[in-house]
Each structure stands twice: as C-alpha cells, then as structure tokens.
Image: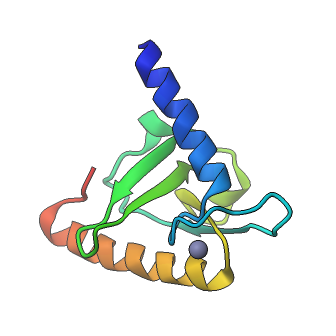
Amino acid sequence: MKKNLRKAEQLKRRFLTTCGWCGQTIPEDVEVFGSGAKVRSDFDLSPHEGQIIEIALTRSPKLLLAAVATRDSEAKKQGNDLVFMTCSDQCGKDLKMAMEQEVEIGNQFGYPQ
Ligand SMILES: [Zn+2]
C-alpha cells in the first residue's frame, strides 16, 4: 500500500513537470498547455477519478501520463475524460491525434490498460 502511494506521488510529479507527449521537462516559468481527450464510454475510468494514470500506446512505444477528470471538473463539463499537460500546442495536437487512433484500435482489440 505504501509503495502504491509513493508511485502515485511520483506519477503526479512527473505529470506536472513533464510534457505528456514528448516527455520533455517543462520549466516552472513556462506556460503549460492543457488538453483533453475522450475515451470510449465502456472504458470505466471511475476507479481512477482524480488520479494520474499511465496509458500505453499500441502504435508507438510511448507511455502517456494523463489525469482522470473528476465528475464535477471543468474538463468533464467540456466532454473530456482525460486531461494532459503538454509543453506546446503542437504536442497537445499530436497527443490528441494519437489518442484518437488508439481509441480506434481500442474499438477493435480492446483498450490497453
Ligand atoms: Zn512536448
């Protein structure tokens, strides 16, 4: 249990300080771009609400870090299930595109967990 807690802390720190797409460190004085993505409705994220999760991509060897939007969050109101932090607008777009492709794959083979 203690180990899990520490991992959650580490994920949170990584989520806040590195780009969710290219993995570059985001300096503190640099503007962070937030972006959101939707997941399939049958992929239940509610046990992870408010947590940082790792998402493995099947098309590239990337491990994305995403925050699971809570029920009453602003992101959720905008129709997003996941929130990403990226270092640039371009990274946000690339990430979103990759997620959309993953979801397509997910529809056929099941969403990677
Ligand atoms: Zn980036």
Q: Tell me the residue at 27%/76% (across/down).
A: 104
Q: Tell me the residue at 86%/63% (across/down).
A: 29
Q: Is residue 70 visible?
A: no
Rendered position, 92 above or below 58: below
Q: Tell me the residue at 49%/83% (across/down).
A: 94
Point out the image quarter for the N terminus.
Answer: top left
Q: Position of residue 36 (x, y in %)?
A: 58, 67
Quadrant position of residue 3: top left
Q: Is residue 35 visible?
A: yes
Regarding ligand 1, which quadrant of the image does it lie in? bottom right
**Left of 100 or right of it: where is 20?**
right
**Left of 112 or right of it: where is 36?**
right
Q: Position of residue 73 (x, y in %)?
A: 70, 49
Q: Position of residue 14 (x, y in %)?
A: 58, 48
**Residue nearest the viewer, comparing 89 with 6:** 6
Quadrant position of residue 26: bottom right
Extreme residue in the top direction: 1
Q: Position of residue 53 (x, y in %)?
A: 45, 46
